[in-house]
Amino acid sequence: MPATAQAGETIKIRSAIQHPMITGHTDAGPNVAPRKIIHTFAVAYLGAEVLRVDVAPGIAANPFFAFNLRARSSGDVVFTWIDDTGEVIVETRQLTVT
Amino acid sequence: MGGLKVLCIAIVLINGQTIGTVAADGPFPDEARRMRSANEFLSPALRAEQADPIRNRGMLWVEQGERLFAQPPPPGGAQSCASCHASPETSMRGVAARLPAVDAESGQLVNLEGRINDCRILRQSLPPLDYETDELLALTAYLTALSIGEPLTVSIDGPASAFYAYGQQLWSERQGQLNVACTQCHDQSVGRKLRGDTISSAVPTGYPAYRLEWQTLGSLHRRLRSCQLGVRAQLFELGSREYLALELYLKSRARRHLIDAPALRR
């Protein structure tokens, strides 16, 4: 994502994360690997949630999300990924609005 | 005048037919036999995805490798990679293009994965990393990416010549239940179809590569293993002398091709 934007401008944000997204359906037989996917991806801007995705097992490994955001004022954009083991990955990027 | 025109058309037709039959059944014309970069076999959409550092998922491992390289290892290890190899952007540039090479002390052929593990054992007092672990893939991806744009320049002279000859022998030997040799597809049938895909020239510049079929980054040895699975041959161990010799042969065959790892591959 860009570090700066003009007020009212729509910016494009793209995110990718390293995750195996194990569906729980592979290795048929006695050794089925338990499902381990990122089930939720959420984005907050200026303290308010602007995007929430319920992710299904059909999404490929290392999921990539792109979306638009309208810049209002300077603040943090916080990206949160939550997976089936309860692991929460949080990344924060600063957006400066001029 | 009219007669001359017809004659000209006839000659063109005959020439066209001759070229057509040679390409279909006999040996390929020189133009097609030229080594084609693996990127030529990608769709424009995949090529664009590969060139974009955010959409190219291989870059996730490069970032991880950059962290692992700079970070001091967990307690017990003496130093980080960067404490010996300072400013890797310049000092490690071109290293991946020269490997595999024969190690002067042991006399063995060592590739980038082997070099990383040698450093871990000898200099960092850490256990070696297994093939296809995220850590080893990340370090190889990072170090190979530092050589992007460098031409492959492996040496096949002196001590390496025996390994090169062994690699060439493996390349041209029939194997597996299907009883085919590497060369029958990747020299003699380049550009033709095999299942849903086009047979490539086996140019290994993109490895470790993010293969869509795997949904993850994988080493060149894993890719060689996929071909062996395809012809139902007995698999060699990842990192074995057979795969190392084949890696040397493939990289010398593709000399002057530019490194573009981590690449996207189907």
Image (tube, grey):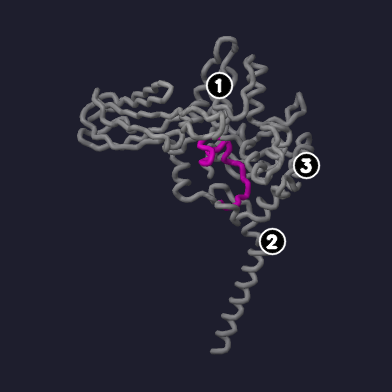
C-beta proximity under 8 Å, tags 3 and 1: no
* Identity of the residue drawn at 39% across and 23% down: A89
Q: Position of residue B5 (x, y in %)?
A: 55, 85
Amino acid found under the numbered disc labelled 1: Ala
Q: Which residue lies under the disc numbered 1? A: B86
Q: Which residue lies under the disc numbered 2? A: B27
Q: Nearer the viewer, mark 2 or mark 1?
A: 2
Q: Position of residue A29 (x, y in %)?
A: 56, 33
- Circle 3: element type: helix
* Identity of the residue drawn at 34% across and 23% down: A92
Q: Nearer the viewer, mark 3 or mark 1?
A: 3
Looking at the rendering, the stretch of residues picked out in magenta corresponds to B197-217
Give the quarter of the figure containing the C terminus of chain A.
top left
B61 horizontally vs B128: left or right: left
The chain letter under disc 1 is B
Amino acid found under the numbered disc labelled 2: Pro
Q: Quadrant of residue B81?
A: top right
Q: Mark 3 Cα within 10 Å, few/some/many (few <14, many 20+)?
A: some
A16 horizontally vs B185: left or right: left
The residue closer to the viewer here, B177 or B8, is B177
A93 horizontally vs B121: left or right: left
Amino acid found under the numbered disc labelled 3: Ala
B214 horizontally vs B190: left or right: left
Kindly report the secondary structure that dominates the magenta region of the rendered protein: loop
Q: Which residue lies under the disc numbered 3? A: B165
Q: Mark 2 Cα within 10 Å, few/some/many (few <14, many 20+)?
A: some
Label 2 – label 3 distance at C-alpha: 24 Å
Does B201 appear in magenta? yes
* Identity of the residue drawn at 55% across and 15% down: B73
